[in-house]
Amino acid sequence: MNKEMELEKFITHEVPFSEINKAFDLMLRGEGLRCLIRMEH
C-alpha cells in the first residue's frame, strides 16, 4: 500500500514571488487551498 499523498492535486493557484500578497489574499478569502509561489531569477 502506497502511503504517499500526491500534493500536486491540491495546488489551486500558482503565482510569482512578486505577487505573494495575492496568494495570501486568495487563501484568506477561502479561494485557494494551496498556492504555489514561483521564485523568479
Image (cartoon, rainbow, N blue to C red):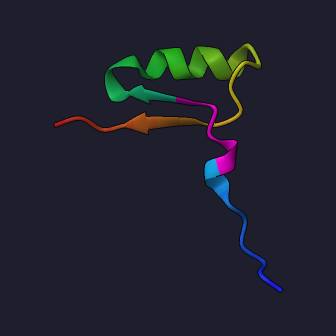
Q: Is residue 14 above or below residue 7?
A: above
Magenta highlight range: 9-13
Residue drawn at x 54%, y 22% as measured from the top left: 23
Residue drawn at x 72%, y 65% as measured from the top left: 5
Q: Is residue 15 above or below residue 19?
A: below
Q: Quadrant of the N terminus?
A: bottom right
Image coordinates for residue 29, horizontal then vertical, percent: 73, 13
Image coordinates for residue 39, horizontal then vertical, percent: 30, 38
Please tell me which residue lies in front, 8 or 17. 8
Residue 21 is covered by the magenta coloring: no
> In which quarter of the view is residue 18 placed?
top left
Image coordinates for residue 4, horizontal then vertical, percent: 72, 73
> In which quarter of the view is residue 40 placed?
top left
Image coordinates for residue 41, horizontal then vertical, percent: 16, 37
| Identity of the residue furthest to the left in this view | 41
In the rendered view, does 38 fall on the left or right side of 36? Answer: left
